[in-house]
Amino acid sequence: MVTGMIYVVMMVFSLILLILSSSTVGFDYYQFTQQYQPAVCNSNPTPCKDPPDKLFTVHGLWPSNSNGNDPEYCKAPPYHTIKMLEPQLVIIWPNVLNRNDHEGFWRKQWDKHGSCASSPIQNQKHYFDTVIKMYTTQKQNVSEILSKANIKPGRKNRPLVDIENAIRNVINNMTPKFKCQKNTRTSLTELVEVGLCSDSNLTQFINCPRPFPQGSRNFCPTNIQY
Ligand SMILES: *[C@@H]1O[C@H](CO)[C@@H](O)[C@H](O)[C@H]1NC(C)=O
Ligand SMILES: *[C@@H]1O[C@H](CO)[C@@H](O)[C@H](O)[C@H]1NC(C)=O
């Protein structure tokens, strides 16, 4: 009787531990990150072999944690080629640094980030399908958002707030996340990445947590180049 009670108490206790430990490796939002190709090439130590397009294209869809402890390299089936999606992925998610190896980029993003995605994302195909949908049919193409607000790329110094407002207009007035980098040749600060954040079930936009703090190398000042 007593041993039975101890057994039940221990079972309940380990169940609680299990739930606690699984929630620490979880995530509470998704960050859809797009990169501006010319700035990516400028900020890379080795130049891009092929000329970049003046476009924001996908860097990745990242399960993230507002406490800063983002999950990475989770247990999931290994990356496999999905031929059917390639024609679209090449356009929206190119390997800007090496256009001979787009798949290497997709594999790395799946291993590091996609593997940690969970409901509503079910598997690798669904992960890549979801990104295609977000960029194309859900109109989260940042180049298009800016171009519709009449902000065209042109290596111009401009107020970041203009870019921020154009984006806020299409994401329910939520705060995007900006990443900048100093161009070592021109010493101007370029906009490199824009993140759009959604709740963990991908149903609505949220304010992106954790902006790059002032003083960090990726902080965006009031005026930036795009
Ligand atoms: C994204 O938007 C840019 C600017 O409007 C456009 O040139 C590009 O074709 C768009 N990409 C896709 C896949 O729709
Ligand atoms: C989506 O998740 C949020 C919390 O991240 C929750 O408040 C909301 O009810 C969920 N919506 C649906 C439709 O499940």
Image: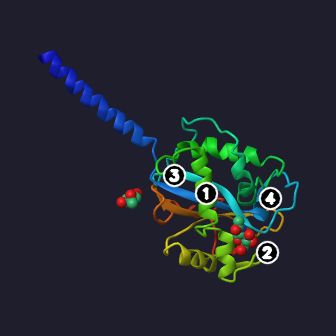
Label 2 or label 4, whichever comes before in sequence order: 4
Residue 214: mark in rendering: none
Q: Secondary structure at mark 4?
A: helix
In this rendered view, identify the residue nearer to me: 5 or 191. Answer: 5
Q: Which mark is residue 41?
A: 4
In this rendering, which labeled residue sits more in front, label 1 or label 3? 1
Circle 4: is it few (<14), some (14-19), or many (20+) Cα within 10 Å? some
What is the distance, in whole Å, between disc 2 and disc 1 at their CAs?
28 Å
Ligand 2's quadrant is bottom left
Mark number, residue 131: 1
Q: Any mark on residue 64, and which?
A: 3
* Marked residue nearer the N-terminal end (1 or 3): 3
Q: Residues within 10 Å of mark 2 (few under 14, many from 20)?
A: some
Tag 1, which secondary structure? Answer: helix
Ligand 1 neighbours mark 2 (CB distance < 8 Å): no
Callout 1 touching callout 3 (CB < 8 Å): no
**Residue under the image location 78 percent in, 67 percent down:** 187
Amino acid type assigned to the residue bearing label 3 in the image: Ser
In this rendered view, identify the residue nearer to me: 116 or 185: 116
Residue type marked 2? Arg
The residue at label 1 has a CB less than 8 Å from ligand 1: no
Vertical placement of residue 157 versus 138, above or below: below
Crowding at dot 1, Cα within 10 Å, few <14 / some 14-19 / many 20+, comes out as some
Estimate the spatial distance between the alpha carbons at disc 4 and disc 1, rounded to whole Å. 23 Å
Residue at the spot of label 2: 155
Q: Quadrant of residue 93?
A: bottom right
Q: Are marks 2 and 4 in contact (CB under 8 Å)?
A: no
Q: Earlier in the sequence, mark 2 or mark 1?
A: 1
Tag 2–tag 1 contact (CB < 8 Å): no
